Image (tube, rainbow, N blue to C red):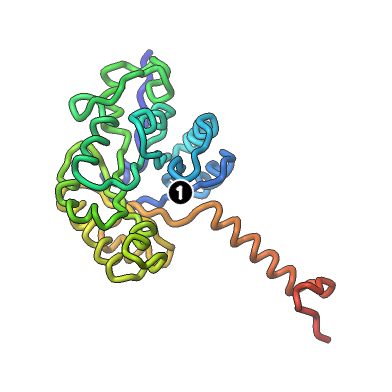
Amino acid sequence: MTVSMRPSLVLQKLRSGENVACFKVNLADPRAVEIAALSGFDCIWLDQEHIGQDWSILAAQIWAAKSQNKDTLVRVSRGSYSDYVKPLELDATGIMVPHVMHAADARKVVEMTRFHPEGMRAIDGGNADGAYTAADFRQYLKDANRQRFVILQIEDPEALEGLEDIARLEGYDMLFFGPGDFSQAIGAPGEMNHPEITAAREKVVRLAKKHRKFAGTTGTPDKVSIYQTMGYQFISIGADVISLTQYCRQLMADFNTTDPKNSSSGHYYKS
């Protein structure tokens, strides 16, 4: 009996014209992934660019998402082909490559992450994505190209100059605009409403749609409808560390306000 690759929820929704909600998990505990998945997010973003989790931790996080039939996106480290394919072999549903700068850069990503005829990804088949060889080999190659997504992250002004050439390439699924590093590159760190960021965001989604690619970005909940109207179907709207930090701060603010014995707060009950 052969085993089929689990279809991607993200791709299913995007191809049907629906919107996707993503949540970023920085903490190592796979229970954080399961909580986000149980909350209803379609996709959990795991990060190897800035965090670099141990591979066993990443595997457990992917299992946690799969237990709830949700997708995982791993932003990979820029490096060799093995940095790109290992998350896929752990059965992550997709990867995102940061700081894609030009068409040649993008083409190399496709070559390393897609099987023939789209690319020349190194073949194993003995890992989770190939059901540990239980999957039909040829079907596995087809499913990996069709049911696993590759995202190119655009977060540098230089990439905008050749964005049309990047967008028209075949073999990947999404252009993802990263406003954080882009804001720093234009000399306006953190100014998310800067006109150049708005223009870049609009250019990314316009060229993605023109060349039949999906568009993704990050945004706060109050911006979701604006970005969706632009054409962004995939939006990452939060992170575990933000939630936990804000929750803890609010708890302490409430505690300091209501506890008359907490002299350090400067707040007291009034009779």
- Quadrant containing the C terminus in the rendered view: bottom right
Name the amino acid, label 1.
Phe
Determine which quarter of the picture holds residue 3. top left
Q: Position of residue 237 (x, y in %)?
A: 43, 57
Q: Is residue 112 left or right of residue 126?
A: left
Q: Residue furthest top?
A: 1
- Quadrant containing the N terminus in the rendered view: top left
Depicted 184 relative to depicted 109: above or below: below
Most foreground residue, 79 or 94: 79
Q: Is residue 244 left or right of residue 80?
A: right
Q: Residue at left 42%, top 21%?
A: 127
Q: Position of residue 20 (x, y in %)?
A: 36, 50
Most foreground residue, 115 or 43: 115
Q: Position of residue 161 (x, y in %)?
A: 18, 55
Depicted 8 relative to depicted 237: above or below: above
Q: Residue at left 29%, top 45%?
A: 152
Q: Residue at left 30%, top 39%?
A: 150
Residue denoted by label 1: 41
Most foreground residue, 37 or 259: 259
Q: Is residue 217 left or right of residue 52?
A: left
